Every structure is written in C-alpha cells, then in structure tokens.
Image (cartoon, rainbow, N blue to C red):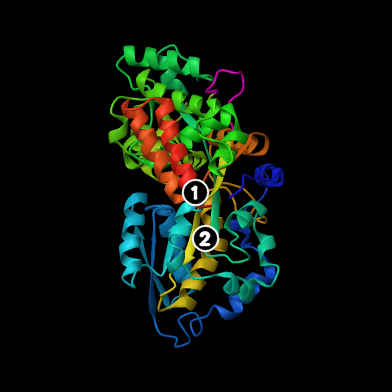
Amino acid sequence: MKRKSVSIGLAALLAVSLLAGCGGKGAAETGSTGDTKAVQEADNTGNAETTGGGTGEQVTINFQTWNPGEGAAIDEVIAAFEEKYPNIKVNHVYMPYTDHVEKLKIDLASGEGADVFGMQTGATIKEFRDFEMDLTSYAEESWGSSWKDQYMDFCMDLLNEDGHYYGLPLGLTYAGFTWADVNMLKEYGLEVPTSYDDLKECAKVLRENGQYPLTIGAKDAWINIDTWMSMANDINPEKLYSAIEGETPFTDPDLVESFRIWQSCFTEGIFQDGALGVGVYNDTSDLFEKEGSIPMIQNGSWSAGFYVSGDPDQNRVFNSEGADHDIFLIDWNNDGKVCPVTASVDVCLCMNKNTKNPEAAWTFIDFMLHEGQDILINRYFSYCPSRKDLELNVEGMNQDGLDNLAYIVEQSENNLGGYREMAYADLKQVISDQLTVLALGDATPEEAAAAIEAASQAQAR
C-alpha cells in the first residue's frame, strides 16, 4: 500500500469524543449502537427465526481470535449477544496471536476453521484471502448503501480491496509507546526518560540496582516491528514508507540508522537480558500490569485497558491509591522531537467462506461492531473507536488512566507517522528476521539493510 497520512479528522473526533464523554453518558449507557436505521433493521430481522438460518433451531458458531483476549470483556460481550439472540451460541476460542494464525492456516485449509475469526490488517488479511467471505453485500443489505460512512475513513481506506471488504474494523490502536511506573522510577532517583540518551542512562541506573531496564517481549515479531518502525519514523517517516513500497532502498543512511538504534538497544543494555526469549503476553505484560515488579515496558495504546479490565491483579496495580503510570514516546535519535505513533485497525472480523451458518456468523459480526464495540471500548478500553458515532466515555477509569488516555488522543491528533501494518508478507517476514539477527549481534546494520533491500526488490507489489 502507498503511504497515506492518517486523517487528522480521525484523531480530532477522538479528542472531541473524549471531552464530551467526561460529562455525558456513553453509548453503552444510552443504548446507541451505531446508525439508527441499521439498529432498527437489525432489531426487526435479528430474531430467532432468521438469525439461525431460517429454522429457528439453536446453532453454534465458533469465534477464534487473539483479540479480544480471555476475560471479563469478551465474556460480557458474548453474554449480551446470546441474550439478544438466544438461538445462537458463541464458542469463543482464544489463542495467542502466533498460535491463532498457525491454527487458522491448518483448519481453514482443511475446510473447517472458525465461523468468525479475528485478523490483522496488512499482510495477514491478504494471506488468508482465499478463506475470507466478501462482506460487502452483507454490510450493504444490513446498513444501506452508505454503510461505510459510519466508520472512520482511515479504517475503510485500509480495508478497501477495490471496493470489496473481507474484514470489518472492531477498533483502532496506536503503537510506538512506552509505559513507565513513575513511582518505581522515583525509587531509583529517576524520571520518565524522554530521549535515547535519557533512556540509556536510566537503564544503566536500573541495572546497577538489580532492576530490569526497559522490558520488551522480543520473542514476538509484532512488538519488534512496532518498536523499529517508531525509530525509523522518528528519523524520516517519508523514507520508511517509501522503502516499504520499494521506492527508497533500505540501504538509505536514514534507514540504516534505524537498524543501528534498534541493535544498540540490545548491545547497550537498554532492553533486558534474554529479551528474545520472552513474549509480550503474558510474559513481560504480567510483570508490569499484574505484578508491578518492573519499571518500564514497550506496549501500545491498548494497554490503557488495564485500568478498567476487571482483572483483580491489574486493578490492584493500576488503581491503588497513589499509583502513577505514564504512557510516553521516546526521542530515539536525540533530535529534540519524540517519535511519531503509528495507527492500525487492531483487529478486524472476518467470516469463514466455508461457514455452515453464514447468517448467524454475520449477525455476530454486526453485533460485535456495534453493541460489542461499545462494551469493549467504553467499559474495558480494548481499542479506540472505529465508528464515527461511538462517544468515547470509558467507565470507571481513574484520573491516572484518563490522563494517559488524553495523551494517547493528543498524539493521535498531532503526531501520526503513518500506518502500523505493511501489506507485503514476505518483506515483513524478512524485516522481522533481520531485527532478530541484529538483536543477536549476528549482522551489522548495513548487512541487515542489504538483506532487507534484496527482499524488497524481490517483493511483488
């Protein structure tokens, strides 16, 4: 895909929604679930006679995803759906992201697989195209010819495949952030770092005191790519996205510099020892979100959901009296400006082309995008809204959480670098592999850049 700047209108809408939400009722309280006409049509047609394939018999659909994960949020959504549509039972299958993708490959290829599944935008959704139902006609029939207008333009642009939509957006997220336990840093006489040099000094002091430095779950390719893209965006966003499109070589000095910064986080001790052996979920995330035992972690905007997750351990860490956590961005190249954030549709919902219950599967997708999204965002802050009409009014978030949410919205409005995902699976894989090679010290930044450039030249676009 060509580099496209994310519309400021998207972020401005989030900002307005946040301000409005502080004093009013959210969609989950008022019962608003998107376009009024669409909701009326769903209420008129979504009864036990029609949603189960016209027989009125009980049907079960399998919903497999890594996101939403296990816990109170998805349990509440599924309970609300099954109450509204008692003839459809949802079997939720949660799997960590890598396992989710691998299982889908096997199950869908055999003609089976979940009826509805979560998918990442970019390369992954294209990789599964042979197994994805075109949802365009379903959306038009349910919501009318102007159905796309209810969603952020950015979402529709990202998912548009020559006028066809094989996945629909459940929510937006922003990547490139770092999180800090401010009180823990103060214990070591430290403040939240703002630049690479600050971060390096901060890591040094933490290590001298037997504490983890900045923690990253580098076993997971996605957090490595998110972090590297924040570095490359900080140096030169135009060149980053131009290189992804094959228009600028990855051997360009600015991109080589981004690989140098990435590698230095391992060689200079900024990331913790053994980072390549642990994942984000639930390795590093539990240390930060549930145990409160590490001072900093790489993770995205979605982590603000731990303020309202309902998990007793997260609640104890993030909602205890005096707790103080900051989400922030790093100036990776020490030029006085923090890195931009990247944006994506965090998860889109797809229908299995071979599902035996397409009407029930679509009814569930429709619900998830409306009532379900309201619950996931305003009660659990799993995402930022993908729908234009969803008022951002997160229930039960303390002042620390609201301050961090305001920062996320501010950065989405004023400091966007571009898309988080890339559309080229082979290129993405080589970048991921070379980031690991760099982390291991088995190549120089120049050598890694050359290997990625060779893959870029071979990549069909």
From the top left corner, tell me how far across and down residue 400 is, in percent.
Answer: 54, 32
Q: Is residue 253 above or below residue 354?
A: above
Q: Depth check: 285 or 26 in front?
A: 285
Inspect the image, locate mark 1, and give the three-letter code of the amino acid beneath it. Answer: Tyr
Residue matched to label 1:
380
> How many marks on residues?
2
Based on the picture, tell me whether residue 182 belongs to the magenta stretch.
no
Q: Residue at x 40, y 85 (%)?
A: 57
Category of crowding for the residue at label 2, using alpha-carbon neighbours closer than 10 angstroms: few (below 14), some (14–19), many (at least 20): many
Residue matched to label 2:
372
Q: Residue at x 58, y 50 (%)?
A: 1
Specify the principal SS of the magenta part.
loop
From the top left corner, tell me how far across and down residue 231 is, in percent.
Answer: 51, 29
- Residue 321 in sight in this render: yes
Could you tell me which secondary element the residue under label 2 belongs to?
helix
Could you tell me which secondary element the residue under label 1 belongs to?
loop
Inspect the image, locate mark 2, and give the three-letter code of the amino acid beneath it. Answer: Gly
Report whether 192 appears left or right of 63.
right
Q: Which mark is residue 213?
A: none
Looking at this view, name the residue that lies furthest to the bottom.
55
Q: Residue at x 49, y 79 (%)?
A: 51
Highlighted range, magenta: 331-340
Q: Residue at x 61, y 23 (%)?
A: 337
Category of crowding for the residue at label 1, using alpha-carbon neighbours closer than 10 angstroms: few (below 14), some (14–19), many (at least 20): many
Based on the picture, tell me whether residue 336 belongs to the magenta stretch.
yes
